Amino acid sequence: MSARILVAKPGLDGHDRGAKIVARTLRDAGFEVIYSGIRQRIEDIVSIALQEDVAVVGLSILSGAHLALTTRVVDALKAADAADIAVVVGGTIPQADVAKLTAAGAAAVFPTGTSLEDLVTGVRVLTAERVSEQ
């Protein structure tokens, strides 16, 4: 059974080409991928993650609000008693913010320029760790 991944675009960012490429790449790598579409509310992302029983929520953020949005998703998952769902973040993320995102609870960060191969490897490692913890 492959890990289920939710790829979501929180906030008002309407650019989703990268998120669609990521979703397809993960699907082609053997993951079961749910793509939520653009302009998703935090509450809806968490609801979909719970309903679909995902192992990972992948946030695609280009708007510059990555710290606030990631923190809100992590906190909302904790409030829903779903802190075991890993949150990963990709998009336009300055290198200086990577440590801040991991401190906020992101399990991994994939800034612009991350190769698709590195993304797949990172998600495989993360989902393998989650399976072994259960």
Image (cartoon, rainbow, N blue to C red):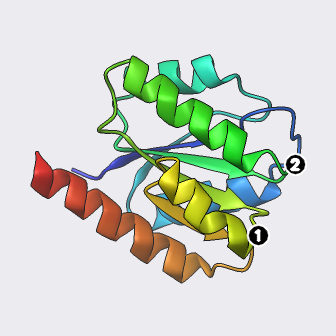
Residue 51 versus residue 101: which sits nearer the camera? 101
* Element type at mark 1: loop
Horizontal arrangement in the rendering, residue 7 relative to residue 83 (left or right):
right
Q: Residue 9 is drawn in which quadrant?
A: top right
Q: Residue at x 49, y 29 (%)?
A: 75
Mark 2 Cα-neighbour bin, 10 Å: few <14, some 14–19, many ≥20: some
Front disc: 1 or 2:
1
Q: Residue at x 56, y 33 (%)?
A: 73
Q: Residue at x 49, y 58 (%)?
A: 27
Amino acid found under the numbered disc labelled 2: His
Residue labelled with disc 2: 15
Q: Residue 7 is drawn in which quadrant?
A: top right
Residue 111 versus residue 118: which sits nearer the camera? 111
Horizontal arrangement in the rendering, residue 114 relative to residue 104 (left or right):
right
| Image location (x, y in percent) of residue 5 | 44, 46
Is residue 8 placed above or below 39 in the rendered structure? below
Amino acid found under the numbered disc labelled 1: Pro
Residue labelled with disc 1: 94
| Image location (x, y in percent) of residue 130 | 23, 53
Horizontal arrangement in the rendering, residue 26 relative to residue 93 (left or right):
left
| Number of residue marks | 2
* Element type at mark 2: loop
